[in-house]
Image (spheres, rainbow, N blue to C red):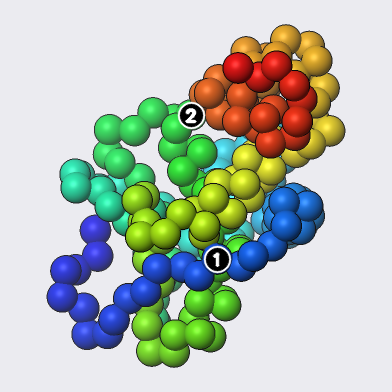
Amino acid sequence: MPARHLPYPYVQPDASRQTRLEIEVLADKCAHEWGYRSGKSLDAVCKAAGVDIEYSRRPNEIMLDVPLDDQPIIWLPRTGRKRDDRVIIATALGHWATHVDDTRKANPGCGVQALYEPDTPEALEEANAFGLAFLMPTEEFMESWAQGRSQAASDCFDVPTKIAYLRAKGLDLGDTA
């Protein structure tokens, strides 16, 4: 985990106020730029995005740490499960793609830390929307959902079934409870 007493202040990401469609388009663009295809390991994707992955013990409060002059790091719980880790990584990449540049411009001289439990939820909600769209592109998701709903989508995209339900709800696929 990052040091408690850093030589410069940190801020949490500012929400970008993008629409769900804009976030979907950005997630698709980033997937192509970073070479992501459904089911692919996210380690190579993070490397292409210029972000490192590390593990930490509790308390694990920071999801994405973006220091001023060092490589950004996604912090995963040491005891996490692979499917949960994939969702955390995709959400952190959502912060990286959606919030970091604008937050840095608005707060020069500050690092950026996206927390698992932020002070305000808007930026995290946008990052979650990015992560879901990134891991489960709309057309592929709808095909897997039609084949077997949450279980088929969970298996296809290597995510927990509750995450497949969230994606279905976001796409208004009806009866997703």
> Which residue is labeled 2 in the image?
83
Quarter-of-image position of residue 72: bottom left
Q: Which mark is residue 15?
A: 1
The answer to whether residue 9 is above or below residue 61 is below
Residue 170 seen in the figure? yes
Q: Residue furthest top?
A: 148
C-alpha distance separating marks 2 and 1: 26 Å
The answer to whether residue 158 is above or below residue 95 is above
Amino acid residing under circle 1: Ala
The answer to whether residue 94 is above or below residue 157 is below
Give residue 158's position: percent from left, percent from top.
Answer: 58, 26
Give residue 15's position: percent from left, percent from top.
Answer: 55, 66
Is tag 2's residue or tag 1's residue first in the polypeptide sequence?
A: 1
Quarter-of-image position of residue 115: bottom left
| Local secondary structure at mark 2 | helix
Relative depth, front residue between 117 and 164: 117
Amino acid residing under circle 2: Arg
Residue 154 seen in the figure? no
